Structures are given as structure tokens and as C-alpha cells.
């Protein structure tokens, strides 16, 4: 591996480590979101949601950085950037399960890729759980409001907006 390829591989390692930490932070933000949704405090939900949105927006910037690193690395390898992934770079540089004498840098990249993939899957699953909990909360609120605003036969008392005493 030439010096420039090594430089961009190092940058890719830094990106992967940063991304792994960000996935862990995203998991913590999802946990906080669940606590707030379950607690029912609208201000806390709003604050947790804003923090989550901020983390997700930062992900776009990190993706852009990854794209730039892949473009530079692809140029050094004589390949189109579109064929590069963390795993393919690690394998091309002598890392991964098939490597008989793995390059330490390439092996670190391969190992980080495995760890990052698992973290992304955990975040995805957690996000689905939190979304389901939020959906259940909305359903409960909708059912309670429907019961409060309906007559004994389940027909709406008012068809246009209705104000209710929330302490009733």
C-alpha cells in the first residue's frame, strides 16, 4: 500500500471509529426518547426529539465525509468510488477472514466494520421499538379522547374541534 492509500485508509479508520461512537450516542438518545415518551411529559419529549434530530442531521455530514474518503482512496486504488465499502477496502488491502497474513491496518478496518455493522443493526432495532412505543402511546391517547368525546353509543358528540378539561 502506497503512502497516500495508507493516509486515506487511516482516515477511513478514524471515520469508522467516530461513526461507531456516534451509533452508541444515537442508541443513548433513543433510550432517552423512550423514557420521555413513556413518561408522557410533552416538554421532555420535545427536547429528546430535538436531540435525536440533531444526531440524525449530523449523520448526513459524516456520510459526506465518508464519500470524500472513498473518492480519494478509490483514486489511489484506480477504482470507481462506488465499488468501495469498508469491507471491500479492508479485503483489498489484505484484511478480513480470507487473509493469510493480514495487514494490521486493513485488519483493524475489517474488525471495525463488523463492530459498526452490529451497532447499526442495534440502533435500527431500537428505533423500531421506540417508534412502536410512541405509536401505542398515540393510540391510547386517541382512544381516551374518543371515549371522552363520544356519547354512550360511541358516536362523536361534536364533529368539529372540542375543548376538554384535561384535569377531568
Image (cartoon, rainbow, N blue to C red):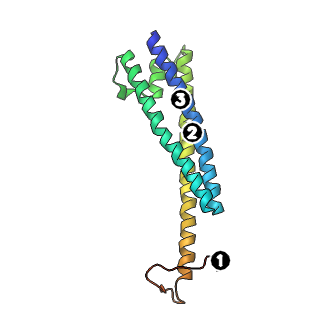
Left or right, 78 with respect to 112, comes to left
Which residue in the protein does label 2 denote? 23
Q: On residue 128, which mark appears?
A: none
Spot occupied by residue 11 in the image (x, y as percentages of width and height): 50, 22
Q: Residue furthest bottom?
A: 152
Left or right, 105 with respect to 71, comes to right
* Res 98 seen here: no
Which residue in the protein does label 1 denote? 167
**Frontmost residue, 157 versus 82:** 157
**Frontmost residue, 27 versus 157:** 157
Element carrying mark 3: helix
Q: On residue 16, which mark appears?
A: 3
Q: Residue at x 53, y 56 (%)?
A: 131
Spot occupied by residue 153 in the image (x, y as percentages of width and height): 51, 89
Left or right, 135 with respect to 69, comes to right
Element carrying mark 2: helix
Instruction: Give the mark nearest the N terminus, 1 or 3.
Output: 3
**Separation (CA) of disc 2 from disc 3:** 10 Å
Q: Residue at x 45, y 29 (%)?
A: 66
Please name which of the two marks, 1 or 2, marks the residue nearer to the observer: 1
Amino acid at each position: 500500500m502506497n503512502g497516500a492509500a495508507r493516509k486515506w485508509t487511516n482516515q477511513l479508520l478514524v471515520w469508522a471509529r467516530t461513526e461507531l461512537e456516534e451509533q452508541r450516542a444515537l442508541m443513548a438518545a433513543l433510550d432517552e426518547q423512550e423514557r420521555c415518551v413513556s413518561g408522557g411529559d410533552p416538554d421532555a419529549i420535545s427536547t429528546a426529539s430535538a436531540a435525536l434530530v440533531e444526531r440524525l442531521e449530523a449523520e448526513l455530514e459524516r456520510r459526506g465525509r465518508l464519500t470524500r474518503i472513498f473518492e480519494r482512496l478509490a483514486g489511489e486504488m484506480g477504482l470507481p468510488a462506488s465499488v468501495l465499502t469498508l469491507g471491500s477496502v479492508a479485503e483489498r488491502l489484505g484484511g478480513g477472514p480470507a487473509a493469510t497474513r493480514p495487514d494490521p491496518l486493513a485488519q483493524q478496518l475489517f474488525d471495525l466494520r463488523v463492530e459498526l455493522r452490529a451497532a447499526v443493526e442495534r440502533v435500527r432495532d431500537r428505533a423500531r421499538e421506540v417508534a412502536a412505543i410512541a405509536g401505542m402511546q398515540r393510540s391510547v391517547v386517541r382512544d381516551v379522547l374518543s371515549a371522552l368525546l363520544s356519547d354512550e353509543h360511541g358516536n362523536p358528540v361534536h364533529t368539529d374541534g372540542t375543548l376538554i378539561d384535561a384535569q377531568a
